[in-house]
Structures are given as C-alpha cells and as structure tokens.
Image (tube, coloured by chain):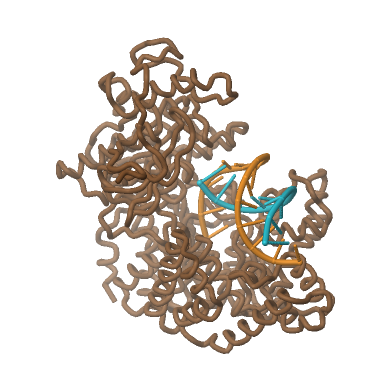
Chain colours: A brown, B orange, C cyan
Amino acid sequence: MPAATDLLADLNDPQRQAVTHGDGPLLILAGAGSGKTRVITRRVAYLLQQGVRAGNILAITFTNKAAGEMRGRVEQLVPGHRVFISTFHSLGARLLRQYGDRLGLDRHFTIYDTEDRNKLLRDALEATGIDDLRYSPERVGGAISRAKNALISPQDYERAATDFFQQVVAPVYHGYEKRLRAANAVDFDDLLYLPALALRLHADLRAELADRFRYILIDEYQDTNTAQYEIVRRLSLGHRNLCVVGDPDQSIYKWRGSDIKNILDFERDFPDARVITLTKNYRSTQAILHAAGTVIGHNTQRKKKSLVTDNEPGEPVRVLTFDNGLDEAEGVVLRIKEAVRAGRFRYRDHAVFLRINALSRTLESAFLRHGVPFQIVKGLAFFERKENKDVLAYLRLLVNPADTVSFLRVVNEPVRGVGKASLEKLQRFAGEHRINLVEAAGQVGRITTIKGKAATGLRDFHRLITELRTRLDRPPHELVQLVLEKSGYEAMLRDSGQDEDAERLANVGELVTAARQFHEANPDCTVADFLEQITLASDVDGWDEQADHVSVMTLHASKGLEFPVVYILAVEQGLLPHERSLARDDDVEEERRLCFVGMTRAMKELYLCHARHREFRGQLHCAIESSFLRELPDDGVERLDMAADRTPSRSAADEWRSRTALALRDWADTGVRPFLPPRKPNGTPAGTPAGTPDTPDSGLAVGTLVQHEQLGIGQVTDLSGFGALRRVKVRFPGHGEKTFIANAVKLKVVKKKGDG
DNA sequence: CTGCTCGGCCTTTTT
DNA sequence: GGCCGAGCAG
C-alpha cells in the first residue's frame, strides 16, 4: 500500500481535496481533460488506504473498457484489491442474477438487445391488432424505453396516457412485458428499471445492498437517467457516501433518457454536499481549449465556467473545407499519411470522429486505397453479423429454452422445412399448454395440423437442443464448436459453394476463437457469461488502442478518450447539428456539447472538416458548414479551402464533378435528379460542363480483370448507376469485395472477360 | 406449405 | 445500403 503522499504528490489542490474528502456527499465538476479519471482512481485507492474494505466500494463507469482500465490502475496502486467496478448495466445484470429470485425472475434470463426487442414488439403489435406504419417497433420501442428509463410501469403508463399515441402504446407495452417475461428475458432498460424498482419496493434488499456498498463513486454523472438516479439514491440513502463526477458541458445522452438535472440538482438533493470544481486542463493546447470554449459558450442553459491550461499555445485549430465527401475522406487520409511519413506523429496518434456511423464507409475506402491502417471502433460489428448472431442464438436457447426470439431465429437455420405457418401453430400450441417452444417442438406429435417435413424438422430440432443442453457445462468455445457441428450450420456454409458463405464460415470460425479467448481470460466463466459480455459490450470495448492504426469512431464513442490529433468530419448543418435536433433549441445545445466533447479530445492538433457537397442516402446534396464553425473565434483558428487550391485540371474529384454535370444532362428527362453543382470552383456557372466533354469507354464489364494500386488485381463483379453515380464492385483475393465510384477510382483493365 | 427473389421503405447518436 | 414483406415457383 503506497503512502498517502505518493497518492497525492502529483495532484493539484482541488484534485487533492477531492481525493481526500472524507465521508458524506461529494460533487466533482470536472471539466474536459482536468484529470477526472485520475481523481476517481486515486480516491478509490485513498479510501482503501484509509481502511475502507474493498468489498464496500462500488465504482460505476460508463463503459466496460473504462471499468477494466480503472480496475487495472487501482490494482497498480493497491495490488490485490477487490473493488466492484462496473457499468450501470453490468451492475444491473449482476444484481438481477443474484437477487432475481426475490423478484420472480429466473437466474438464466436472456438479455435482449434492440433487435430482439423489436422482434418481440412486432409480435405484440400484431397481437394488439395494430397494423400501422406510424407505430413501428422502433417508435413504440423508443416510447417504452423512455418510459422504463423514467421508471414508468405499464400500469402507470396506461393511467397517464393522455395523447393518442400513448393510448395506442399502452396495451403494446403490457403485451411486450408479458412476452418478455414469458421468454424469461429482460431488455437493456430492464437492467436499470428492475433493480431500481426492487430497491424502491424491497426495503430489506435496499438495506442489504446499501450496507454492502458503503462508498459509491459514479463517473459521467451528467449522463445518468432517472432509473440510474434512483439506484444511486437508494443505495446511498443511509451512509450518504456518494461521490459523483461529471461535466454538464459533456452531457450527450438526453435522447436515451439521461437527465442533466441529476447533476445540476445534486446540491439540492444533498444540501450538505461538498462541491469541488476542476478547471485546470492538462490535455489540450491553448488554441484547442480556446476554440472549444468559445463554441460551448454559445449554450445558454449552462453554468458558466472556463478551462485554463499551462500548456503551450500550439498550432491553430484548422477548419478544412473540401468540395465533397470523397475529397474530404481522401484529404484527411492523405494528411494523416503525410504526418506519419514526416515523423510528426504515429498512426495511433490520430482519431477521426463522425456524427453518424453511415459516414464511415467513404472513409473506409479511402483508408484502404492509401494503405493506411485504421480501425472503425464499433465493438459489436463482428457479433452483429448474421452468421454469428445465429450461432449466438443457439447458445442463448441452450441457456434459456424459453427464449422465443432465439428459437424463432434458428429453428429453421439451417433449413429444416419449418415454415411460418407451422411456427404459428406451434406457438399457439405452446401458448395454450403454457410450455416453451422447445418443449412444444418435442410434443409436435400432438399437434395434428403439423405434418411431414415440418413435423420431422421440429422433432429433430428438439432432439438437437435437448442433446446440446446436456453439454452446457462445457467451456464456451467447445459449445460453439458443438453447435456448429451438430446443428448442421457449419456443413451448410461449407457445402453451399457461395463465396459469401465461405466468408461466413471463416467468421463463425473466428467466433470459436473469440469464445476460446474469453475462456482463457476468464476460466471460471460459463457460456452464459460469454453471452452477457457480448450483449453488454459497448463500441469502445472492442477498441484496440495498442495497435498502430488510426481510430475512427462516432463522437458519442469518443467520450472519455484523448488523442494527439483529432479530425472531426462533416461538421455541416444537418449532420452536426443533426437535422433531427434543429427543431428544438435544447436539442441543438446537446449537439453543441457533442461538438465540444469531440473538440476537447484533441491534445495537440484539431481539424474540423466539412464539404460543400455530400452524397447521402444515395443522393447528392449541397452542404453548408455547421453553425458551430461560425461560432469559432478568429484568433487561433485557421481556415483552409482545400477545394480552391487544387489544380483545376485533373484531380479525381474534379473529374467526378464534371461528369456529374454530364450525367445530369444525359439523364435530365429520366426523372433521376443527380446533384447539380451550384458553381464550379473556377466560377463557371452551374450546369455548364467545363471538364472533358466526353468520357471514353472505361472498358469495364462484369468479369473484367482490373488492377488497383493498393489492392492489386481483382475481378469486376457488378456495375450499377450512371454517370457520376456509376459504381463498380470488384472482388480482390484476400480483401473481399469493394465498391468504388467508377469515375473516382483508378482501375487499369488487365484482361477483358473472354479474352484468350 | 416452404423458400427464394425482388422491390419498396427507412436510415442519429447506444447499453 | 439493409431489412421486411409480397409474390411466385417448386
């Protein structure tokens, strides 16, 4: 155990006060880059040093990754500690598994993700007789999610339903809950909702847990919702040793039920709370802080505070203007490449932030084209692939045979001749006899209307699940392998002969590896634990910050991270702020906070990029720069027009642009409205093609062998679109299929289809 | 009755 | 680009 002086030596005054605060409520208002994580970690270590038992400390972080890092850092300070560090959702899952019996919940419940939820909702909507596009599972699911986050039960919801929408949703909410419980499943929101209600209704449970967690620390408190607030409040009711850390300027999850009031009203909830403000920034240059501070200063609903730093003034913040999204992606990638080549930074020093995931595609192809290593930080992507979700559904069904959604997902995968009609009969039978679908499948002989292939298929499926269930005690990777073999899934992929199935086969193979790695890292964990970890993983949990690559992620995912060089792309009206926020001032303020979060991740250099034109949903639009860019100060900001200083003749994008004009002329009477550049960079009026008047035949056809600079030789597999919108799909051995804008990619024809 | 293909529809951010 | 439902063939 280190001496107190070691724990405090490198802290500033307010940081030290926060770490050494004794008992009682504590609010730490920690500005961006003010050493928040360090303070929480040290405080945990300090408490341990003061004789608090590790088992009495609960620390809540925003992601599992952050939890893991904090565990590691506390471990360094106080080896062998057993502090409970987790996210709210993981804590909720843990509590429900441990105390679920008191709430009438089976320990082996499945956690449904949003996709599962929507499937169940579709069923509930149908049963309620609602067949209206306005009541999509997504919309209704959103309403139910908000209700649960606000601790509103189906009964409360029904009672309080005033408008028409709510009155329609109320019975669906009931039906959905019924189905969830019947499937022995909970959704993401239940992981907060059910524990919050349990703590409210079961005094003995509350007392037991409050006695166990005598010191509670919550990070990112500005992003807690009502359910989380209730959990925190109930747990700290007796001892009041609650330390919350947050920054109202970084509240970016209102859409998910977070209530900024939780942090703003902390002093009202706890009048004796000590408040410590951390305003000294250790992360960014003066230029970056000045720019970020000026932008966030435009928020009206805000406690005024500014960050100060002793860091150097640094490079100016740069606003890069591109002609279009392709140029933007290209320009950023090339800039990064050059910075690395010149030895100024490593790839891993760079991050690219986006408002929406959809923008990552353009970027991805630019990275591939230029051979720049990158990772798109979207943790779940691998497990979200169809084949992997299928295999995971088998596992979930083994753990919880009542899991309707998983049953329906895999009962006919691979094909067992069980179709929709048979499944409806099976579900009716199961409902009447109050048994789950697996049991019903075992009794298919009693359902006289199901015969032939469907009956055989269901019987086989029942036998399969029953047999696999006897192996539930096997380690996760063995179980995955067993599922692949016994279910016929692997054979189906292997024998199909389709290229994409070969890729799927490789993916499920990777899943076995992932399960094995999980087992090696957590030898005592079961397959149920494996499934839970996957379901509760956040995007950044899958991020590999050790590898030397550029990190690409959403602005939301960037919270809590820092990088020497940051690029924020598409800082345009409609994207940042997002168009869905423009109607309400407080929504725009949240977008501004999102922008602020992104800007303050940067340590040395910050680039804010936007384009004058952007392709979106298959359509090209003129784009205007974000109002946030106009809010930037003049000093410490440099504006560079990357569209102006290109040579007017022969860049890929110029060519693309001139062909767009041609395409417009060629297809003017087809009803297709390709994008029309308002004005060319050299001042030529819109619509007048100034580029080469004609496009020579590219010679591309399906089957053509082409050579790409980075990816090598590949074969054209598909051509689509016209003119500037023409796309070419090429399969490269080892790289898979890539789609390019035909006019923007350099492909040398190696050999035409049918040539000798 | 099942299974495949095609076309229409929607697409913010996430645990 | 991706998902769901409709429609058609076996």
Location of residue A435 by image quarter: bottom right
- Is residue A635 visible in the rendered structure shown here? no
Residue A209 lies, in percent from the top left, at: 58, 76
Q: Is residue A174 left or right of residue A706?
A: right
- Is residue A251 visible in the rendered structure shown here? yes
Q: Is residue A204 left or right of residue A236?
A: right
Residue B8 lies, in percent from the top left, at: 68, 39
Residue A98 lies, in percent from the top left, at: 59, 79
Q: Is residue A77 left or right of residue A523?
A: left
Residue A235 lies, in percent from the top left, at: 59, 69
Q: Is residue A196 above or below residue A248?
A: below
Give the residue drawn at x 48%, y 37%: A720
Q: Is residue A274 above or below residue A623?
A: below
Q: Nearer the viewer, residue A117 or A228?
A: A117
Q: Is residue A72 above or below residue A710?
A: below
Give the residue drawn at x 28%, y 37%: A286
Location of residue A437 by image quarter: bottom right
**Quarter placement of the N terminus of chain A:** bottom left
Q: Nearer the viewer, residue A198 or A478?
A: A478
| Residue occupying the far left of the picture | A342
Give the residue drawn at x 54%, y 19%: A668
